[in-house]
Image: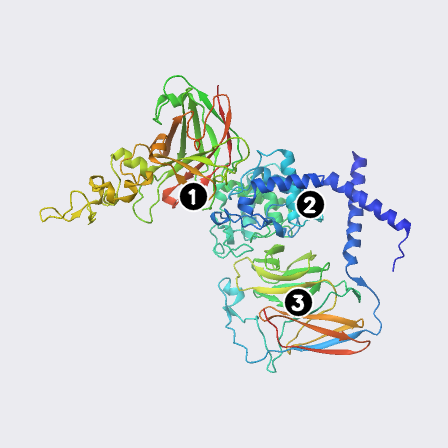
Amino acid sequence: MNKVKVFSIINIIIAFLFFGVLISRSYQEIDVANGGAITGDVKFIGKPEALPPLKVTKDNNVCGSQKPSEELIVSKSGGVKNTVITIEKIEKGKKIPKEEASITNQNCQYIPHVQAMVAGNFLNIINSDPILHNTHGYLNQTETTFNLALPIKDQKIKKKIKKIGIMNITCDAGHTWMSAYIAVTENPYYAVTGDNGTFEIADIPAGKYQLKAWHEKLGTQVAEVTVTEKGKAKVVFDKLKK
Amino acid sequence: MIKVSKKFFTTIATLVMALGWNICSAQIKETPELVEKGEEVFKRECVVCHGEKAQGDGTAAYLLFPKPRNLTRSVFKVRSTPTGEPPTDEDLFRTLTEGLPGSAMPSFRSLTDEERRGLVSYVKKLANISEAPERVINVSQEPAFTSSMLTQGKEVYTKLKCWECHGNEGKGDGPSSLTTKDELGYPAPPNNFTRGIYKGGGSNSDIYLRFTTGMDGTPMPSYEDSVNEEERWALVQYVRSLAGSKVAVQPGGGDVVVKRVSGKVSLNPLSPVWGKVEAIKVQVMLLWQRQESVDSVSVKAVHNGKDIAFLLEWEDLSPQARFTRHQDFTDGAAVQFPVVPAGTTLFSMGAKEKTVNIWFWRADMQLDIEKKKFHDIEDSYAGMVSDDYQLARDLYPKSIEKPLIQPIGAVIEQDPVYITGWGAGNFVSIPKRKSPVENLNSEGFSTLTARGIDEQNVNGQGIWDSGKWKVVFARSLSSENKFDANFTPGQQIPIAFALWDGTQGDRNGQKSVTPWYNLKIEK
């Protein structure tokens, strides 16, 4: 009996090792010398509609009475914040940083609102509010990736994020206005646009790539980009659509 | 990169073999034959709700709440694994075997072990589950019950904010209860613990697992990182205490014996002859969930070599037989048999060329019989008048002496020629009824067909007594008609049951049902 158990444990370990081999095979880590970069802007053409603030319907003492809508933030010069830029289907490239991402429930709002991380890395889910938050990650809108209760202030739960796709984070504890997005990527070549709508992705091996922009409200746009050694390619996304 | 050597290949081969062995020992041994078997059973038993492509969109799906699972997405509520992880084979097997109380997922314990194992393998294939879950949550040793656990459990319930959804008294009515939605945006009301309905089973370890793992695809989160072992067991005891000893069970088939008796078969539900027959408790499941529902029907069955009779009894504290206003619905009950018992027929009202025979008792028809007249709107609302039936024999041609306004209840005095349903011999429209039971056939949804008046051969009687409906269905054992079920002493035939609660708005596909039971007719 004991022998069987030991054998079984060994097998589980072997199985994990084996799957490990399988997972890392889809993206190959190499040393990138003389890599190029892609910089660019995400632009909104025209005048964006002003989105009304979100009404807070629960726990007003902690959450306040309303929250600004983060669905579409456009700078004065037309730069679109919170757009996720990714390189699609890159077979080899720079090492995947073993860094942990985090999302914080703070004053009944997710911080950050949009971020990206590589599949296989850990996400810390944090509650800094003295109330119950119920952080529910839905991959591709409908597949539960995690569904965690955070009833205690300053609680932190670490969760490995395994599947690739756009994950929508919602709060099932009656905080219906709360929403955030995490783009889970296969490779470390990603960026999220800042306040002025710009981005930069560096250390890319020379080659032709498909660069994809995704924004929660505006949709997506794909561009063909050629990266040269030590070069800087420039891309402007201004035709995102759903 | 790596130079692929012969040795490397051997290592990989060993790993693959070892991996295969590992799956064999920890999980169900999956073979292509087993998956194929599962697919065959799935096509037979599951598609009506889960759909041909298992996307939760079968032809019955619109009648069901909660909705049938989209099995292609690998999101499962009842698991013993952390949130976001796939269930174990055992979890899936258990859901198939026990069903999900509080939903229309019945127990499939009437399938063989192999069929259920096949289904597990096939469902995993549909859901694209290729890896084992990263770990299984270990249910710790349960401490012995002490009453202080209830006090502690209540504290934990408060501290973890369970009440925000489930309410202070566990009735599912907390402040967030109206905002909770499932992954598709459908309302997902929090469980009312006082009813003893637990989707993942009612044992203490089941309840422990539900809040520890959470229920993926619903707003019920995982509390694995929020509560220690002692608190978990206290919470289990407290949640259990809210329902007393009640634990809902899903129907899953079983035997119903038709006892052979001598003498006449009585139509009277209160006849002492029924006292000599053992009752079988048949669990029923609501298709569309609500807070109040009957959970079982008591069934007695007898035959005397010539006639067969069933007595159904179920609790209903608000009998409803009025059927006159648009918003009124009547209580009812039905039994269903396949016309040809051999082969497999869906319990969901048959399928093409797999005709079922349905006997449908309705409280409104019973009332017509008791009153020896058509119970019409002025019977519900005394003094109500309306326009006359324009072409009534006695009223046409109209004369000054006769009033133009007549109660509708005078329908029997009218000429059937002008009351088309009656005139055409539609059983539903007959104002003078002989039986409160309709004889019908069906070959799937939207095909329910009433038989002609001369083929109405099922008799019955229903009485509301002591807070219960008590209804007898009776017919001769054999029938010449090819659309009638036949009952042969010494043999077996599938039987299924359905109940409608008119007060709750039940009608048509909004009802409580059972899967097939096995009717054993004594020699």
**Residue position marked by numbered label 2 in the rendering:** B136
> Circle 1 — which element?
loop
Dot 2, crowdedness within 10 Å: few (<14), some or many (≥20)? some
Where residue B323 sits, quadrant-wise, is top left
**Residue position marked by numbered label 3 in the rendering:** A115
* Above or below B461: residue A121: below
Where is residue B77 shown, x and y percent of the image?
59, 48
* Above or below B216: residue B98: above
Where is residue B83 shown, x and y percent of the image?
64, 51
Dot 1, crowdedness within 10 Å: few (<14), some or many (≥20)? few
Where is residue B119 shown, x and y percent of the image?
63, 41
Of all residues shown, which one is farthest toward the left? Answer: B401
Q: Chain of mark 1?
A: B
Hey, what amino acid is under mark 1? Glu
Colour convention: rainbow
Hey, what amino acid is under mark 2? Val
A99, A165: nearer the viewer: A165
Q: Earlier in the sequence, mark 2 or mark 1?
A: 2
Q: Is residue B447 visible?
A: yes
Give the mark count.
3
B74, B188: nearer the viewer: B74
Where is residue A166 shown, x and y percent of the image?
64, 63
**Residue position marked by numbered label 1 in the rendering:** B292
Q: Is residue B75 visible?
A: no
* CB-based contact (under 8 Å), mark 2 and mark 1: no
Hey, what amino acid is under mark 3? Gln
In three-dimensional space, the C-alpha distance between marks 2 and 1, rounded to whole angstroms, equals 35 Å
Left or right, A220 with reference to B409: right
In three-dimensional space, the C-alpha distance between marks 1 and 3, rounded to whole angstroms, equals 45 Å
Residue under the image location 65 percent in, 44 percent down? B122
